[in-house]
Amino acid sequence: MKKLIIILLLLMGLSIPVSAQDYSVPPPPEDAAGFLPKDQDSFGEGLWYVVTTSFRALMPQLRQSGQIALSVIAAAMLVGILSSINTDGKDAVSLAGVVAVSCLLLQPAGAQITAATETVSQLSEYGKLLIPVLTAALAAQGGSVTSAALYTATITFDAVLSSLISGLLVPMVYIYLVFSIVCAALGNDMMKKLRELIKSVMTWTLKTVLYVFTAYIGITGVVSGATDQSAVKAAKLTISGMVPVVGGILSDVSESVLVGASVVKNAAGISGLLVVIAITVAPFMQIGLQYLSLKLTAALCAIFSDSKISALVSDFSGAMGFLLGMTGAMSLMLLISLACYLRGVG
C-alpha cells in the first residue's frame, strides 16, 4: 500500500504543468536595472536600496536645477531693475523678460516631458510582460476567476492610460506651456481661459481613469476572490470524499501544490514591485525636483520682478506637476494590481 501511495504521488508530481521558467520575472529595463539590488527577497531592504540609489543619482540634477533657478532669478532681477529705471518702456522690458525666461525654461521642460513619456512607456511595456506571469501563478494557486479579472483590468487600463498620456496628455502639456507664455507676454484673457480649460481636462482625465480602475478592482476583487476561495475549498472536499483510500492524502498534496504556487507568485510579485518602483522613482524624483525648484523660483521672482514672470515660472511648475501626475498614475495602477495579485485568493 505504501508503494502504491508513493507511486501515485510521483505520478501527480510529474503531471503538474508547472515550471520555473513559466513563472520567472521578466528582466527589468536597462535604465532601471542599475537601481535594483542583487538580493530581492526582502521588499523593505530592496525598497530602501532603490530609493537611496535613486537619490544619489539625483545629485547632478540638483546642480542643474539650481543653475536654472539662479538664471531665472537673475533675469527677473534685471527686468525689475530696468523697469524701475525706464518706466516708459516697462512693457517692452517685461516682454523681453518673458521671452528670456521662456528660453531658459523650455529646454529643461522638454527634457522632463521626454523623461516622463519614456517612463510611462517602460511601465506599460514591463506591465505587459509581468502581469501574465502573475496571472499564471495565481491561477495555479486556485485563483482562476481572480486572475482573469485582474488581468483584464490591468491590461485594459494599462493600454487606455498609456495611450491617453502619449496621444493626448503630453501634447496638451506642450499646448499648456505655449498658452502660458502667450498669457505672460500679452495678457490675453482668452488664452488664460484656454489654459485653464486644458488644465482641467488633464486633471479630470487622470482622476477619472484611476477612479474607474480602482472601483473595478474593488468590486471584482471581492466577488472573484470569494468565488475562488469557495471553489478551492469545494475541490479539496471533493478530492477527499470521492477518491477512495487516498482521498485525504491527495487533498493534502493539493494543498501543498497551492502553497508552492503562492510562494512563486509572492516572489515574482515582490520582484515586480521593486522593478516598477525602480522604473518610476528616479524620473519621478527628477521631475519632482524641477517642480519644487520652479515653485521656489516663482516665489522669489515675485519679490524681484513683476507678476508676469512669476506667473510664467509658476505655470512651468504646474506643467511639471502634470508630468508627476502622469507617471504617478501609471505607476500607481501597476502597484495596485501587483498588490492584488500578492493578496491572492480571498
Image (spheres, rainbow, N blue to C red):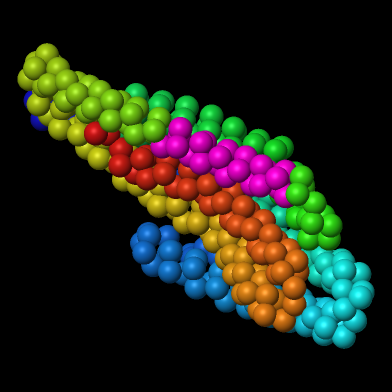
In the rendered image of this protein, does residue 144 appear above or below residue 338?
Answer: above
Tell me if residue 119 can be seen.
yes
Please provide percent x and percent y for residue 24.
47, 44
Is 67 above or below relative to 277? below
The answer to whether residue 125 is visible is no
> Which residue lies at the image location 72% right of the left edge and 81% below the top edge?
304
Please give left or right for residue 170 compared with residue 124 in the image.
right
Q: Quadrant of the C terminus?
A: top left
Q: Is residue 131 above or below residue 88?
A: above
Residue sitting at 92 percent across and 74 percent down?
A: 89
Majority secondary structure in the magenta region: helix
- Residue 224 lies left or right of residue 39; in this view the side is left
Residue 116 appears left or right of 206: right
Split into 4 quadrants, where in the image is the N terminus?
top left
Q: Position of residue 109 (x, y in %)?
A: 74, 61
Where is residue 65? Give x, y as percent. Answer: 69, 75
Q: Position of residue 206 (x, y in %)?
A: 55, 42
Q: Quadrant of residue 159?
A: top right
Magenta span? 192-214
Q: Is residue 193 magenta?
A: yes
* Above or below, 244 relative to 255: above
| Between 300 and 147, the one nearer to me in the picture | 300
Residue sitting nearer the eye, 328 or 53:
328
Q: Residue at x 53, y 29 (%)?
A: 156
Marks counted in the figure total: 0
| Image side of residue 229 versus residue 45, left or right | left
Residue closest to the eye, 155 or 74: 74
The quadrant holding residue 237 is top left
Residue 248 shown in magenta: no
| Residue occupying the point 59% across, 65% down | 288
